[in-house]
Image (cartoon, coloured by chain):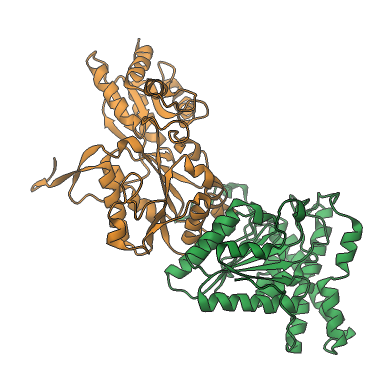
């Protein structure tokens, strides 16, 4: 079954919770800005895929997940990692390659991992995490554990064979998977409209008998409501759900991207719908947020980021002698 | 006949196929985390009849017929292993595993290292391998050497009925991904086992035939071709020591280097294609570690570098044969 209409914005939400949501999005945005600076200063290397503009998706969806749930994400996963509650310091240390990082500096930006929060990465193969999510949900079901697996992926992944196989398996075996498609309209530089004859991605779920809906991914309250409905569906029926979040990334695909495939006008138009600016304005209009509150939030976030950067810079390099550790488990 | 101090231990005769089935059955009984998933493993009884009867015995929650989704179900097996289960993923033939190569190589093999030691993947992936049944180029190749190239994987190649019976349990208890390659031409082969046969070591090669004149290093179905070649050579007084590698990653260098220290000559028999094969790797290791032990260059008998043809005479011409092994040995002992 699928819903034809997008989910409506939730209305009766506690003020403190709203401020919390704003704070969580702000943390991600400022963190990504810091990453941009550090990359330009050559402290972060390799590939860096920033999440600016998509914050409402990670933050909104995370409100529907519990500590015992599992998460599989993509190479653009700083937002999910932060919203999940991974230590910002350990993420920053990972980005600069220090062994105090959440993957000992082995993974970098695209491969953040955290066993404690059941964060199974950080995957650089488009679509590569979906079968893993199916398997994690299968293991939970087999062991009788009532937790769900949330799998983030983009619009590009929907064209990969592994998407179709995973949807089929999750539906057939009735597995508790929340498939969250972050549709930002571009797979690197390929627009969705030239790579898929069906651009309303949530419609594809019907072919697999998977319940689905689509939501405005720039509206954190709408995403939260939609994600909670989706998660509730999964927790009560045991069946998977496909949630398409329509969003946009304000920055390039990665730090190497000249953005030749989209116009500045398009980017500016989407920036008008900045999830943080619009939510902040809404909260101010509602009288929930004062200027002083926003200043305080910015200061707190800045302090946390400064601390994370200091931690990362004070970090140490993994000894080269340890290169072959963890090719196999240490007993 | 196996003996103990008090007399004889009863043995049973079984086929390689039955030994694998018994290994799966034993694992399912002993460890509730274990389950078997793959195409046709349930209702069909397994495309090579390995899992025949297991669905009836253990039910559909432990013996799972998957849809035609190699990447999907192999990745699901990896995910299930991450999540606390001990799956046996069966890929019908190693040729089809290429559809799942992304999951095997980019996920199963990398997750532990890439996560800084946080996430190990205790999955077992069993596949049939090898040619000789006129199944042509998309059903007949040998990919075990290719997978043995990948750090993070373990690659087992049971040749004997005892190893077919005994390797699965330690593979399942291993915290890391283990691939098991069963040469399809061995399924009907009969062998004798102790009635209480159980797990075997999965790290060491075995000397299957002692000899002083040349070391034959091989694995899988080629073991029996090497043993046949050894019998032919023995008639001319050339005694070949035949080593069954049993595992391709890690390779047990010690066993074959120890043999070469005594024989000073080596022939490697490998059903994979010669170029960039596991035989090339072994040859390099012998060169590196036993150069001064050698009295002759190392010879290799591998499959011809062609996609496997259908016509019987062409296929046999492409595969390693006892005669080719004999010829290689004669060349280096002259």
Q: What hue represents chain B?
A: orange
Front-most of residues B195 and A218: A218
Q: Which of the 4 image quarters holds residue A304?
A: bottom right
Front-most of residues A223 and A304: A223
Q: Residue furthest left?
A: B7
Q: What hue represents chain A?
A: green
Q: Is residue B118 in sight in this rendering?
A: no
Q: Left of B184 or right of it: where is A322? A: right
Tally of numbered tags: 0
Q: Left of B66 or right of it: where is A125? A: right
Quadrant of the image for the C terminus of chain A? bottom left
Front-most of residues B331 and A77: A77
Quadrant of the image for the N terminus of chain A? bottom right
The image position of residue B242, as x and y in percent, is 31, 28
Task: Tell me: residue B218, above or below residue B12.
Answer: above
The image position of residue B190, as x and y in percent, is 22, 38
The image position of residue A38, as x and y in percent, is 81, 58
Task: Tell me: residue B315, above or below residue A291.
Answer: above
Q: Which of the 4 image quarters holds residue A184?
A: bottom right
Task: Tell me: residue A18, above or below residue A98.
Answer: below
Q: Left of B158 or right of it: where is A216? A: right
Residue pictured at 50% horizontal, 52% vertical:
B69
Q: Is residue A33 in sight in this rendering?
A: yes
Q: Which of the 4 image quarters holds residue A3?
A: bottom right
Task: Tell me: residue B209, above or below residue B214.
Answer: below
Q: Left of A138 or right of it: where is B223? A: left
Q: Residue furthest right?
A: A265
The image position of residue A32, as x and y in percent, is 79, 64
């Amino acid at each position: 079954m699928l819903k034809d209409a997008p989910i409506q914005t939730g209305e009766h939400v506690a003020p403190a919770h709203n401020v919390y949501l704003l704070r969580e999005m702000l943390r991600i945005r400022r963190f990504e800005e810091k990453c941009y600076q550090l990359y330009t200063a050559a402290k972060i290397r390799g590939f860096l895929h920033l999440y600016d503009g998509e914050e409402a998706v990670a933050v909104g969806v995370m409100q529907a997940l519990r500590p015992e749930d599992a998460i599989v994400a993509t190479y653009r996963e700083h937002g999910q990692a932060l919203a999940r509650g991974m230590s910002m310091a350990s993420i920053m240390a990972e980005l600069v390659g220090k062994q105090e990082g959440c993957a000992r500096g082995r993974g970098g930006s695209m491969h953040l991992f955290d066993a404690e929060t059941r964060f199974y990465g950080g995957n650089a193969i488009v679509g590569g995490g979906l079968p893993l999510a199916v398997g994690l949900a299968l293991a939970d079901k087999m062991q009788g554990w009532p937790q769900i697996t949330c799998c983030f992926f983009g619009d590009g992944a929907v064209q990969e064979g592994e998407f179709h196989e995973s949807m089929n398996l999750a539906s057939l075996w009735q597995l508790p998977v929340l498939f969250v498609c972050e549709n930002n309209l571009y797979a690197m530089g390929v627009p969705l409209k030239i790579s898929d004859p069906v651009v309303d991605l949530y419609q594809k779920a019907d072919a697999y008998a998977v319940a689905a809906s689509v939501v405005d991914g720039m509206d954190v309250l709408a995403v939260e409501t939609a994600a909670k409905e989706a998660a509730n569906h999964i927790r009560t029926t045991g069946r998977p759900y496909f949630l398409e979040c329509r969003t946009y990334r304000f920055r390039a695909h990665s730090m190497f991207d000249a953005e030749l495939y989209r116009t500045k006008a398009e980017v500016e138009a989407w920036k008008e719908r900045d999830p943080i600016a619009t939510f902040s304005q809404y909260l101010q209009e509602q009288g929930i947020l004062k200027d002083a509150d926003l200043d305080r939030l910015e200061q707190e976030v800045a302090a946390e980021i400064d601390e994370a950067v200091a931690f990362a810079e004070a970090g140490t390099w993994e000894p080269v002698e340890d290169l072959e550790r963890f090719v196999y488990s240490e007993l | 006949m196996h003996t103990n101090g008090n007399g004889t231990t009863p043995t049973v005769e079984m086929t390689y196929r039955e030994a694998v089935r018994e290994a799966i059955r034993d694992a399912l009984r002993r460890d509730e985390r274990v389950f078997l998933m793959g195409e046709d493993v349930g209702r069909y009884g397994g495309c090579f009849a390995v899992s025949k009867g297991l669905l009836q015995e253990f039910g559909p929650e432990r013996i799972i017929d998957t849809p035609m989704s190699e990447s999907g179900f192999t990745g699901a097996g990896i995910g299930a292993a991450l999540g606390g289960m001990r799956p046996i993923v069966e890929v019908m033939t190693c040729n089809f595993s290429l559809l799942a190569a992304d999951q095997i190589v980019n996920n199963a093999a990398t997750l532990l290292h890439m996560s800084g030691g946080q996430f190990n993947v205790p999955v077992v992936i069993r596949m049939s391998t090898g040619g000789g049944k006129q199944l042509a180029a998309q059903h007949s190749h040998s990919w075990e050497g290719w997978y043995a190239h990948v750090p993070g994987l373990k690659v087992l190649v049971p040749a004997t009925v005892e190893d077919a019976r005994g390797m699965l349990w330690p593979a399942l208890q291993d915290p890391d991904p283990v691939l098991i390659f069963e040469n399809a031409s061995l399924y009907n082969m009969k062998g004798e086992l102790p009635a209480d046969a159980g797990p075997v070591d999965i790290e060491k090669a075995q000397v299957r035939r002692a000899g002083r004149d040349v070391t034959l290093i091989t694995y899988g179905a080629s073991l029996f071709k090497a043993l046949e070649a050894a019998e032919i050579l023995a008639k001319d007084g050339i005694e070949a020591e035949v080593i069954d590698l049993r595992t391709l990653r890690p390779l047990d260098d010690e066993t074959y280097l120890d043999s070469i220290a005594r024989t000073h000559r080596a022939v490697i028999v490998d059903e994979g294609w010669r170029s960039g094969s596991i035989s090339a790797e072994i040859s390099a290791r012998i060169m590196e570690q036993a150069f001064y032990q050698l009295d002759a260059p190392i010879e290799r008998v591998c499959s011809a570098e062609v996609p496997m043809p259908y016509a019987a005479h062409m296929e046999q011409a492409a595969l390693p044969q006892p005669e080719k092994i004999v010829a290689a040995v004669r060349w280096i002992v002259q």
